[in-house]
Amino acid sequence: MKTPIKPKELNVSSRISGFDEVVSCYTEKEALAEAERCLQCKNPACIAGCPVEIDIKKFIFQITRKDYRGAYFTIREKNNFPSICGRVCPAEYQCRKACVLTKKGSPFASEKAINIHFLERFIGDWGMKDIVRDVRGSTSGGGRTSNISGGGRTSNNVSKKVAVVGSGPAGLCCAGELARHGIKVVIFETLHAPGGVLRYGIPPFRLQRDVLDFEIDYLKKMGVEIVTNFIVGKIKSLDELFAEGFSAVFLGLGAGAPSFMGIPGENQCNIYSANEFLTRVNLMGAYKFPEYHTPVNIGKKTVVIGGGNTAMDAARVALRLQKLNKMKPDVNVFYRRTENEMPARRPEIGHAKEEGVNFRFLVQPVEFTGDKQGYVEKIKCLQCKLGEPDSSGRRRPVPIKGSEFEEPCDMAIIAVGLRANRILTSVTPSLKVDKWDDITVNSGTMETSIKRVYAGGDIVGGEGTVIEAMGMAKKASKAIIEKLA
Ligand SMILES: Cc1cc2nc3c(=O)[nH]c(=O)nc-3n(C[C@H](O)[C@H](O)[C@H](O)COP(=O)(O)OP(=O)(O)OC[C@H]3O[C@@H](n4cnc5c(N)ncnc54)[C@H](O)[C@@H]3O)c2cc1C
């Protein structure tokens, strides 16, 4: 068996001096060599491992034949945003974990498993260049565009108009699916720029903004209208949208409200939720203050609490800010369990370590203390040990009595989870929600308790992944198309 091909990565000192993308795209030679490793299994398990069931076997075979265009369309049949998913999909828990080269029963993919996500990214990036060239070169105004549209246009749909609330991966995917069936779509987005977590949460060193901008521009070229700075539930209600002539509404509201630990001293200055911290930096250019208007404080000794992707992103951003401000990097992730239980993607944990983020496992914060002005100075924690597994299947952290210790910290970032925001659901009583305030749907159609109102993504079932959000959006768009036919 040939050795897996790793894409090139930016060296650590260049990485932490800015926000450039860390992992490079495969070169053609690398992609061909990796694709050749695929065993082309008779019954490929990887396809079932993908939440949108891309025909992975087929697109990898097409790469081996240098049929990149074919591979692009094979992926696009199921996944609207291959360049995005190729960068951020947790492949090690999904398609790669199901790859026959991963040992059965492993908690995540083995090193030997085919690097399906890197191949997807190679094809996605190739497609972006090819499409741009075709659209520019086309005298008919975008021959390739109509090809991508998939020919799903049905003329009786043209008069139908659907409102999509939220422009994260769920909203964008739903909009794209509807638009390619000839349905007029208007996306309403609270923030001043579209993309949801892809723009305000995931930093540019993991997902370059030109990739996201390309996909959004592409939707616009397909006729999708995007209205920003528009909060549905405040500016207009669902009833008002229907009254304006929308035939259906898709809610891709995400899970944008941060959770806190509820410990004493948590409301002191320089303690941020990861969401606020990342939004200030990624979306509002805080690190360029005063050139950009939204400042963010930078700690000399920063503690990040949590073990998920959000914690890794926050820690790596905080470290880069220290470096940009010529400070000695000192960022420390505190996590209640061990590295094995961390929900963050393995490559992201690896990158954070390489870049100099320190990790303290089995520690549970119990209090923050601060100075007279109310600025955080110290964090108090208890040492933990692992107990029995909890409902998530992970071993529960059990605090050890009398193990209390203190650490200095002048900035803390809380990344212990996200919840649904209630802006729209609280003013729409007929919209059924569960005990977590997530919207309840019919799992077959994604229709909510209100007729012709559909939902998908993190607002259904809580924090998930980009590709899961897109999977739900696809299901909803199919149901909407059928309903409007
Ligand atoms: C920091 C971070 C890193 C992550 N990293 C990864 C990763 O590497 N890989 C991965 O697969 N997943 C990752 N995730 C999870 C992934 O980003 C989410 O599962 C995904 O974005 C959910 O998509 P969504 O469209 O449901 O919601 P979101 O992306 O949250 O988008 C929802 C959008 O709706 C808007 N909105 C909300 N309410 C209203 C309203 N009333 N009116 C108008 N607009 C509204 C919001 O402003 C937002 O733009 C990460 C999450 C975070 C926070």
Image: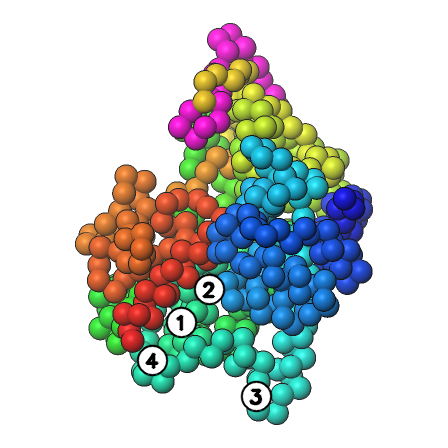
Q: Which amino acid does label 2 sit on?
A: Leu
SS assignment at label 1: helix
Query: Label 2 belongs to which residue?
Result: 172
Marks 1 and 2: which is nearer the front?
A: 1
Amino acid type for the residue under numbered disc 1: Leu
Q: Is mark 2 within 8 Å of ligand 1?
A: yes
Tell me how far mark 2 sits from mark 4, CA to CA: 19 Å
Q: Which mark sits nearer the N-terminus, 3 or 2?
A: 3
Say left or right for 374 vs 455: right
Q: Is residue 477 above or below residue 144?
A: above
Q: Considering the numbered disc 3 on the image, is that residue within a helix, a strand or a loop?
A: loop
Q: Is there CB contact under 8 Å for labels 2 and 4?
A: no
Three-letter amino acid code at disc 4? Asn
Q: Is mark 4 on a helix, strand or loop?
A: helix
Could you tell me which residue is drawn at 50 percent across and 11 percent down? 400
x, y percent for residue 289: 62, 54
Magenta-span inclusion, residue 28: no
Q: Mark 4 points at which residue?
A: 157
Find residue 301 and report its horizontal and vertical position in percent: 65, 31
Which residue is tagged 1? 178
How many discs appear?
4
Residues in magenta, as a range: 390-407
Q: Name the residue under label 3.
A: 141
Asked if the residue under mark 2 is in contact with the one under mark 3, i.e. CB atoms within 8 Å, the reply is no
Could you tell whether 228 is left or right of 304 in the image? left
